[in-house]
Amino acid sequence: MTNTSDGLKRLLHSRFNHYLHVFEQTVSSEIDAFADLARVQGISSIPSHMTSVHVIDCIGRHEPINNTSIAEKMNLSKASITKISAKLLKEGFIKRSQLNDNKKEVYFSLSTKGRQIFEVHDMMHDKIEASFIRALDAFSESELAASLKFIETLIDQTDKMVKGEMKL
């Protein structure tokens, strides 16, 4: 490894850390952006947290779905999903039901109000994706391939850290 290569790797690490900080700020303002888009669509009542919106999204994509499956798909605890779903149920964003062959298990589906949130969330993600793809138009095919390899390496490293497979 050359000093130039080490310097470039350190710069990549520094820029990635900067990206994480910017991303954190984006996540904290995401509910405001979502609320603005919902208002434009004529929706006045929205969940107070993006995690709740993401639960609505998960339910909308997999309904009917139970707490355990939502928790698994979202990588959250069942207790968190129970708390969030109870609030969403109370606010009228979701409905609960039981299947005819299993009266014990509770399943969730979207109410009309929840379906509106689901659609606005999907619209927001479509806009974000389109903007991202436009930004990548400046990259060549080989640059995109190298970027993908870099992102996959970051995901792998982060996943190992989260799972405790990599010592710091």
Image: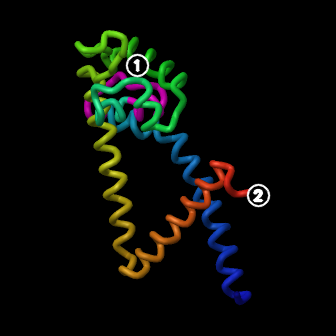
Q: What is the distance, in whole Å, between disc 2 and disc 1 at their CAs? A: 39 Å
- Which mark is first along the chain, 1 or 2? 1
Rendered location of residue 4, percent (x, y): 69, 87
- Horizontally, residue 52 falls left or right of residue 39, namely right
**Location of residue 6 by image quarter:** bottom right
Q: Which residues are magenta?
A: 39-55
Tell me the SS state at disc 2.
loop
Q: Disc 2 marks which residue?
A: 168
Q: Nearer the viewer, mark 2 or mark 1?
A: 2
Compared with 150, 130 (above or below) is above
- Residue at 36 percent across and 52 percent down: it is 128
**Disc 1 target residue:** 88
For mark 1, give the secondary structure. Answer: helix
Please, is residue 76 above or below residue 97 in the view?
below
- Tell me what residue is drawn at x 66 percent, y 53 percent: 161
Q: Residues within 10 Å of mark 2 (few under 14, many from 20)?
A: few
The kind of residue on which mark 2 rests is: Leu
**Amino acid at the residue labelled 1:** Leu
Left or right: 80, with 105 as reference point: right
